[in-house]
Image (cartoon, grey):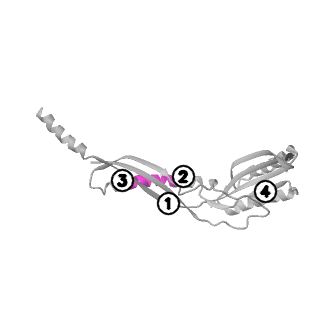
Amino acid sequence: MKNLIIVSSFIVPCLLFSYELDFNKNFKKEIHNDKVQTNISINVYSKEIDYINEKIEFFQDYINEKSSVEKMNGNYSLLPKYNYENSKQIFVGYAGTLSYEVQSKEYEEINEFVSSLNQIRKNMDTTQVTLSTSNVQWIVSDKLLQKNIDSMRIETIDWIEGYLKTLNDACEVKKISINKNNGYRSPRYSKNMMMETSSSLHVVPSKTNQSIELNANYILECK
C-alpha cells in the first residue's frame, strides 16, 4: 500500500507541470511563372439560330484540332437580344458566344493561335462575327503550384522537428494545421478586360514571379 502512495505522489506533480504551446508560423516561397494565359470569346449575332450554330461549330472544330495550345473551361451560350424603344421591348435577334481559357508554355504559340482565329474571322467578311481576347499574362500552372505547395508542407514538418531540438523542455507535436493564405491568387479568378482583337498580340507580357504562403498552426505538448 505504501508503494502505491509513493507512485501516485510522483505522477500528480508531473501532470501539473505539463503544458501546451499553440502558435502560428508563415512560410513563403517565390515561384517562376511557367505558362502564358488568355481568354478568348467568339461572338456571333443573327436572327437565324442556324447561322449562329454554323459559325460557332466552325470555330469550335478549328479550336479542338489545334494541339499547340491548351484549351479549358470551354463554354457556349445562346441568348436573345432586345432593343428598347418607347419603353417597349423589341426582339432583334440572338447572340451566340463561344469562350475558352487558353494556355501555353510559349508566348509565340498563344500569339499564333489568336492570329489564326482572327484571320478566320476576317475571311468571313461580316460584322456579325467578332473575336475578343483578354489581356495576355504569365501565370503559374496548377501543376507547378500544387508541386510547390506539397514541398512547402514538407518544409513545415522539417521546421518543427528542428525547432523541437532547440527547446529545453521535452515536447512533442500534438497537431499541425496547414492553410494556404491569400499570398497567391489564381489568375483565372482575376478580372481581365475583354477587348476586340483586330490583329496579332504584339506586346509580350512581362514575366514575373508569384508568391505563395502557407500558414502552419502548431500545438505542442510539453513536460
Q: Residues within 10 Å of mark 1 (few under 14, many from 20)?
A: some
**What's the CA distance linking mark 1 and mark 2?**
13 Å
Instruction: Identify residue type, mark 3.
Output: Glu
**What's the CA distance linking mark 4 and mark 1?**
38 Å
Check if residue 150 falls in the magenta segment: yes
The tag on residue 161 is 3
Q: Position of residue 172 (x, y in %)?
A: 32, 48
> Which tag, 4 or 1, sits closer to the chain's start?
1
Which element carries disc 1, helix, strand or loop?
strand
Q: Position of residue 168 (x, y in %)?
A: 26, 55
Check if residue 160 falls in the magenta segment: yes
Q: Are marks 1 and 3 in contact (CB under 8 Å)?
A: no
Span colored in magenta = 148-162
Instruction: Identify residue type, mark 4.
Output: Leu
Q: Quadrant of residue 127?
A: bottom right
Instruction: Identify residue type, mark 2.
Output: Gln
Question: On the picture, is 197 further left or further right than 85?
Answer: left
Which element carries disc 4, helix, strand or loop?
strand
Q: Main secondary structure of the magenta part?
A: helix
Q: Are marks 2 and 3 in contact (CB under 8 Å)?
A: no
**What's the CA distance linking mark 3 and mark 4?**
55 Å
Q: Residues within 10 Å of mark 3 (few under 14, many from 20)?
A: few
Q: Are marks 2 and 4 in contact (CB under 8 Å)?
A: no
> Which tag, 3 or 4, sits closer to the chain's start?
4
